[in-house]
Image (spheres, rainbow, N blue to C red):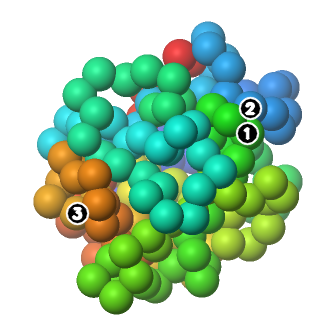
Amino acid sequence: MKLRSKILGIVLASAFAAAASLVGAGAAQANDPNTCFIQTSNGNYITAVSGGGRTTDVMHTNATVPSTWERFHLVYTGQGSYYGLLTFAGYYVTAYSSGGLSSTDYPDVLHTNATVLQDWEKFTFVSLADGTYGIRAFDGHLLSALDGGGRTSRAFDSNRTVLSTWEKFRFTCNV
């Protein structure tokens, strides 16, 4: 089972890399192999409020039907297994302070106002046997959709070290 997970992870990482190299950076577009909807563990979709460009009231996890603001473009950084998540409006998702924050102390641990892909905008994806992924910030911490999703405020923590239920996300790409 471990070997199967490793192989799946390698295949998916290669597929992300190959698709990213073909498309390159740019705002999320419909029917693009690198453009994805991301669901939380309870099936809700991650939303970049207003399509991005925000530092407060940034991300929600309460959408039950994906639309424009739920589109994220995976941008390969050219550095190992790191990717940027570009919002529909062309902004990068940022793990503020590179991760390691709790929404209890900092309500918006994710921002969407970056126009340049730097370290705080780099993420890796941890492939799991059930078809879900963990999203790891540049500092190594995992993103967690609080309550498994369904929130419009304090929707994320970026300080998790164990990949459990709230840290699992499902990607639907080519949307």
Q: Amino acid at mark 3?
A: Leu
Residue at left 46%, top 72%? 109
CB under 8 Å between discs 1 and 2: yes
- Label 1: element kind: loop
Specify few, some or many for label 2: CA neighbours under 10 Å numbering under 14, 14-19, or 20 or more. Answer: many
User: Which label sits in the foreground, 1 or 3?
Assistant: 1
CB under 8 Å between discs 1 and 3: no
Q: Report whether 107 appears left or right of 16.
A: left
Viewer-nearest residue: 135 or 64: 64
Considering only order in the chain, which callout, 3 or 2, is on the residue closer to the N terminus? 2
| Figure quadrant of residue 54 | bottom right
Q: Residue furthest top?
A: 31
Identify the residue under disc 3: 146
Considering only order in the chain, which callout, 3 or 1, is on the residue closer to the N terminus? 1
Residue at left 79%, top 67%? 118
Q: Report whether 104 appears left or right of 112.
A: left
Q: Position of residue 6 (x, y in %)?
A: 46, 52
Q: Amino acid at mark 2?
A: Ala
The disc label shown at residue 27, or none: 2
| Figure quadrant of residue 164 | bottom left
CB under 8 Å between discs 2 and 3: no
Camera sees residue 165: no
- Label 3: element kind: helix
Identify the residue under disc 1: 90
Considering only order in the chain, which callout, 2 or 1, is on the residue closer to the N terminus? 2
